[in-house]
């Protein structure tokens, strides 16, 4: 018989406590091509996902698949270098397992990064979007099924999902650094196929600024567990206006992310220093 989720998380927590004495209060999810942030973590203690009881392992080539404990801007942090996507075949419980585990390890603020397609005509590849809201178009919810009140309420509120203080600080830091940025709405689709022109047009019409295949399940679970959340997208390619769309590839997405990662890593590094 399968262990309840709470018991799995407790076993994972016990294992990691024995591997690291981290007192991290901030967790960071590193998306495609954003490994530069991991390189900035000082005195790192790295634990492969494959060593952690009940932790899934990422199948995406550009995701390292490890948990990193250390300090960033002299603040204790723990990073998930590599995430799990619904399109990889995981259940939503598996997709969000790492987020719940971060909460069990003591964090109270979560920072999430991703790369996404841009849905505004004035966007450029490499632009930074500070996510202020989202549209969930995933086929199922990570909260579907029996609810364990020890993890969070049955019906968590989704107003003010993204932390206003963190958003304001991020905007000021980006402005001070001279970065091209905007606040925006992230739409989450299951993937792995990229969107059709009709779908891009629909997403633009309903108010999305960027579109991707992750983040929202993680955010929902984070709020379910009463974590403060901020999230960032790097625009990998621009998908609007429709007549200007050109085919893109995963290799191109990764290349743009790697080129822009230094900008985002500097922003995250500064943000961590002022959040606590």
Image (cartoon, rainbow, N blue to C red):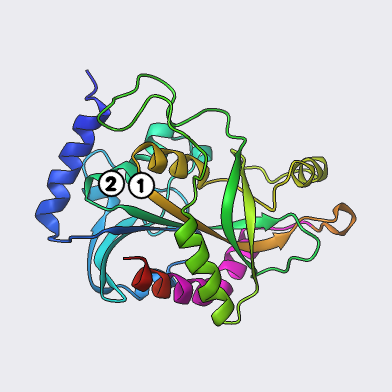
Residue 258 percent coordinates (x, y): 54, 71
Q: Disc 2 marks which residue?
A: 103
Q: Is residue 186 left or right of residue 247?
A: left
Foreground residue, 152 or 255?
Answer: 152
Question: Would you say the residues marked 2 and 1 are in contact, meaning their CB atoms lie under 8 Å apart?
Answer: yes
At 61% from the left and 77% from the top, the residue drawn is 179
Pair 2/1: label in front? 1
Residue 190, quarter of picture: top right
32 to 271, vertically: above or below: above
At 85% from the left and 56% from the top, the residue drawn is 241
Secondary structure under tag 2 reads helix
Q: Which residues are magenta?
A: 247-268
Q: Is residue 55 left or right of residue 217?
A: left
In the rendering, which numbered label is found on residue 21?
none
In the rendering, which numbered label is found on residue 227?
1
Question: What separation in Å lies between label 2 and label 1 (alpha carbons)?
Answer: 7 Å
Label 1: few (<14), some (14–19) or many (≥20) C-alpha neighbours in 10 Å = many
Q: Which of marks 1 and 2 precedes in the sequence?
A: 2
Residue 167 percent coordinates (x, y): 51, 61
Q: Main secondary structure of the magenta part?
A: helix
168 to 10, vertically: above or below: below
| Residue 252 appears in view | yes
Q: Residue furthest left?
A: 18
Residue 270, quarter of picture: bottom left
Residue 14 percent coordinates (x, y): 12, 45
The N terminus: image quadrant? top left
The C terminus: image quadrant? bottom left
| Residue 61 appears in view | no
Residue 257 forms part of the magenta stretch = yes
Label 2: few (<14), some (14–19) or many (≥20) C-alpha neighbours in 10 Å = many
221 to 113, vertically: above or below: above
């Amino acid at each position: 018989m399968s262990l309840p989720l709470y018991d799995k998380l407790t076993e994972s927590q016990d294992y990691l406590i024995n591997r690291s004495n981290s007192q991290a209060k901030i967790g960071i999810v590193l998306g495609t091509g954003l490994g530069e942030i991991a390189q900035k973590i000082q005195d790192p203690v790295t634990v492969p996902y494959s060593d952690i009881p009940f932790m899934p392992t990422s199948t995406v080539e550009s995701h390292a698949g490890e948990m990193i404990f250390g300090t960033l801007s002299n603040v204790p942090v723990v990073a998930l270098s590599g995430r799990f996507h619904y399109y990889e075949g995981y259940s939503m419980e598996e997709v969000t397992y790492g987020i719940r585990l971060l909460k069990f390890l003591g964090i109270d603020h979560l920072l999430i990064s991703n790369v996404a397609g841009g849905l505004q005509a004035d966007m450029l590849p490499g632009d930074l979007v500070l996510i202020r809201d989202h549209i969930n178009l995933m086929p199922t919810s990570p909260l579907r099924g029996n609810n364990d009140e020890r993890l969070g309420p049955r019906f968590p509120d989704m107003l003010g999902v993204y932390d206003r203080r963190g958003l304001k600080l991020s905007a000021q830091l980006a402005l001070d650094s001279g970065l091209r940025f905007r606040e925006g709405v992230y739409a989450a689709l299951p993937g792995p196929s990229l969107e059709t022109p009709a779908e891009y047009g629909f997403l633009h019409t309903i108010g999305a600024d960027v579109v991707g295949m992750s983040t929202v399940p993680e955010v929902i679970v984070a709020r379910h567990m009463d974590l403060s959340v901020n999230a960032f997208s790097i625009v990998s390619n621009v998908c609007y206006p429709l007549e200007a769309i050109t085919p893109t590839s995963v290799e191109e997405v990764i290349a743009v992310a790697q080129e822009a990662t230094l900008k985002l890593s500097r922003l995250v590094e500064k943000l961590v220093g002022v959040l606590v």
